[in-house]
Amino acid sequence: MRAKIFSDRIFLYRLFLFIVFILLVMLIYRVRDKLYNVVLPCGVGILIAYILNPIVLFLTVKGFKRHVAVALIYFILLCSLAVAMIYIVPVVIAELNKLIETVPFYAREFQNFVYRFRKNYRNSLPVGIQEVIDRNIDQMESLLLDLLQNLVGILLSWFSGLFSFILGPVLGFYILKDLDKLKNSMTRYIPNAYRDRVFHWVGKVDSTLGRYVRGQLTVSLIVGILTSLALYILGIDFALLIGILAGITNIIPYFGPIIGAIPAIAIALLKYPRKVPWVVIAFALIQQVESGIISPHIMGESLGLHPITVILSLLIGGTFFGVWGLILAVPVAALLKVVMVSALEKFESR
């Protein structure tokens, strides 16, 4: 009888924790816009610390004290940033100014392109198919024109979030410098009965995501540089901006390379029609090099997720959390897989 009451209490306790967890997730989702300004700099700081910590450990093994190693790494990064400010940032600003100035031109060229396209197919297709195509073209035209007209506001909103990215490295510096102290202080809040289990989970998460996250960022940087160089050689406008976009979107599996290629193909189609095949070939070659040479050497083992799981994760993340959902969908899915596999193994062992 006592065993039954005890098991009922355990069930009710777990049910209560599950309900609290669901309510907490719902609350976070409802106030996600307000939490964004708080979570973003913390997330950037933790990500920077996570990426740089292996380098810090390597330097400490070589005899450097931890705070000296962190200061040395940040000094190198600040020097690199200074070089970027001198040589790269002026180019980015010039391209942004040029983009803002040429928005009316591209909007007008896009409308002319749609008009010519409609004029060509109306003489050769049935009326019903023409109406379907017209509706889809109207929607796409409205969407693209709204995007072009609001482009300045979008760019300004991005720059308004630069404070979070400036605050992130500062938080990352202190996390890296005092990481051992933070680990010890956090360990005190974990009950002794669960401490080994928590360390086991942390080790599993690190082994699952560590190399993937660092490798994916490295591959994306290389893809961004190759894209900028290719477009610069082809003489396509905004080569650096498109390269940055291609590097960022390359983090998204399957769809990322397509998203990164669309702006370059669109600009070439509207202003340099004869260069469109060369732009497509350049992106295809870069992706072949990335998937066949760069990724296998840098990424190593994949996360072991089935393509269907990856696509569903991207759909769910993009639908509920936008761009950040697309970027974080695959790592979160990998974490859930680790949790589910470990839970099943524990259940089967019992």
Image: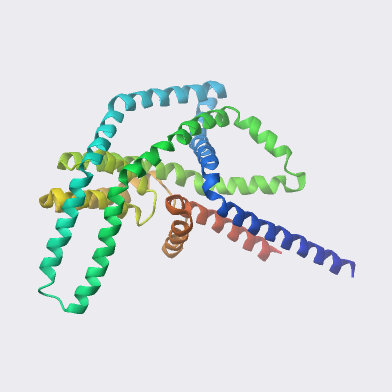
Q: Quadrant of the N terminus?
A: bottom right
Classify residue 174 as left or right of residue 314. Answer: right
Give 92 or 118, whichever is nearer the viewer. 118
Looking at the image, the residue that sits furthest to the right is 1
Count all numbered tags in the image, as a single digit: 0
Q: Is residue 23 visible?
A: yes
Classify residue 158 as left or right of residue 292. Answer: right
Q: Is residue 142 above or below residue 190?
A: below
Say which quarter of the image contains residue 80: top left
Question: How is this picture coloured?
Answer: rainbow
Q: Position of residue 69 (x, y in %)?
A: 51, 23
Q: Quadrant of the C terminus?
A: bottom right
Q: Position of residue 290 (x, y in %)?
A: 31, 48
Q: Position of residue 39 (x, y in %)?
A: 54, 42
Give 294 or 149, whichever is nearer the viewer. 149
Classify residue 346 as left or right of residue 269. Answer: right
Give 221 or 290, whichever is nearer the viewer. 221
Say which quarter of the image contains residue 229: top left
Q: Position of residue 54 (x, y in %)?
A: 50, 34
Classify residue 194 as left or right of residue 280. Answer: right
Q: Is residue 113 above or below residue 200?
A: below
Q: Residue at x 56, y 24 (%)?
A: 66
Q: Is residue 278 visible?
A: no
